[in-house]
Image (tube, rainbow, N blue to C red):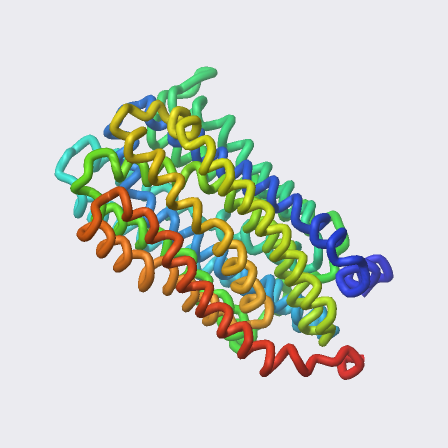
Amino acid sequence: MSVENSVKMNRMGTEPISKLLISMSWPAILSMTIAALYNMVDSIYVSRISTNALTGISYALPVQLFIISAAVGTGVGVNSLIARRLGARRYDEANLAADTSIWLSVFSWLVFVVIGLFFARPFVGFYTDDEEIFTYGADYLSIVTTLSFCAFAEINLEKVLQATGNMIAPMIISMSGCITNIILDPIMIFGYFGLPRMEVRGAALATVIGQAVSLLVAVIIIRKQEHAVKISMKNFRIRWDIVRDIYAVGLPTIVMQSIGSVMLIGYNWIISPTPGAVAVLGVYFKIESFIFMPVFGLQQGALPLLGFNFGARNKERMISTFKVSILISCIIMAIGTIAFQMFPEFFLGLFDADDNMMRIGVNALREISWCFIPAAFGITMETVFQATGHGVYSLMASVIRQLVGILPLAYILYTTYGISMTWFSFALAELLGLLYSTIMLIILYNREIKTLDITEAV
């Protein structure tokens, strides 16, 4: 390892936690917020084609979200393993984990090629008999699945860089793709500047091209700059113990990332008898991303810090990172709670909500927002689990919050009290998840963190 990279790694073990965490987190916060903005803008453009177009890509959304879940989950596993190996000064294994991430991208992509070629049309056809909606959905899904390699590869490279403490490069990588996508969407959908009008196919191709641009930028950064890990595919042989360690954290994260879409399907089914309620829930998820994304970005900065100092057996810095993460997360969530309590009409008005949506939505946004501060604690604890290689703990916390907790609670509250009380299921489920996470964190601390001694790692 070069002197420059040694200094960068020592930074994660020596620099003041608050300053370091903020410097490592703000790029991820910015890029994730821009990604949230893109998702909103993308839907607006597609909706201008027709309602059927928007409906078609909505049917494709669960599979598209699963692509993101598989890519991010694998990347989190890679991030956690590399950070721990660097902290333990096992540099060869850190490099091997980075190499392995590329091959895992290829294998993951091949799975979705099969899905795109053989299952995209039957999947969309399961939901609709409308020929136009079917065509829009099947075309979109086929493109984003069969051409998904760049999504897997660029996300894994982002996580490799984040594991070394480099948060600027992943921000540049992510933003390059998002901005490309936003620019290309109207051009390719509506056929500007001499291009043919491609409608939904144009939206899918704009997404894929944006991912390709991100991958190109990632490769340039990896090749042109020196980093604490090196990627070399020469004479590579897959080591299954590395794959196992990656997916010990990554697989639970993949499942965890996928749970949200399953929860949304179930929640929509529960409240669907009430006109306007499903639309309100959709509006909520678009708005809340601007509250939760900064917290998730903060945790991306905290993950390598926690993993590095866990590997280095530095208990004091691990605990300090956890405390600072909790404090900042709670401040962000408190601001979000106040905003939702005071300005629900404003948020709903951004989506041209009618009187019925306003009547349901004002109450909904206020009730749901009580889950924000408990979520700050839960999300931070889940990051600790991931950083220490206990992804299963994070998985169980998400299952409790988003399936075991929220759906039964929503059903009971809806059938007993009606839609007005249903939204409290979010806060109650979050408290259940927090109780579980607290218990598991105490167990983890007593078993593995309490006895950490930095002198043993020297």
User: Which residue appears at 40% of the width and 53% of the height?
Assistant: 427
Where is residue 90 drawn, in percent x and y? 71, 74
User: Which residue appears at 44% of the width and 48% of the height?
Assistant: 370
When the figure is inspected, residue 249 is found, relative to residue 302, above or below; the finding is below
User: Which residue appears at 75% of the width and 50% of the height?
Assistant: 225
When the figure is inspected, residue 262 is found, relative to residue 39, above or below; the finding is below
Q: Quadrant of the C terminus?
A: bottom right
Give the left or right position of residue 15, taking residue 103 as reference: right
- Which residue is more in the foreground, 344 or 352? 344
Q: Quadrant of the N terminus?
A: bottom right
Which of the 4 image quadrants contains residue 40?
Answer: top left
Which of the 4 image quadrants contains residue 236?
Answer: bottom right
Where is residue 363 drawn, in percent x and y? 34, 38
Query: Does the rendering let one see residue 395?
Result: yes
Give the left or right position of residue 444, taking residue 354 as reference: right
Where is residue 191 drawn, in percent x and y? 40, 19
Query: Does the rendering let one see residue 44?
Result: no
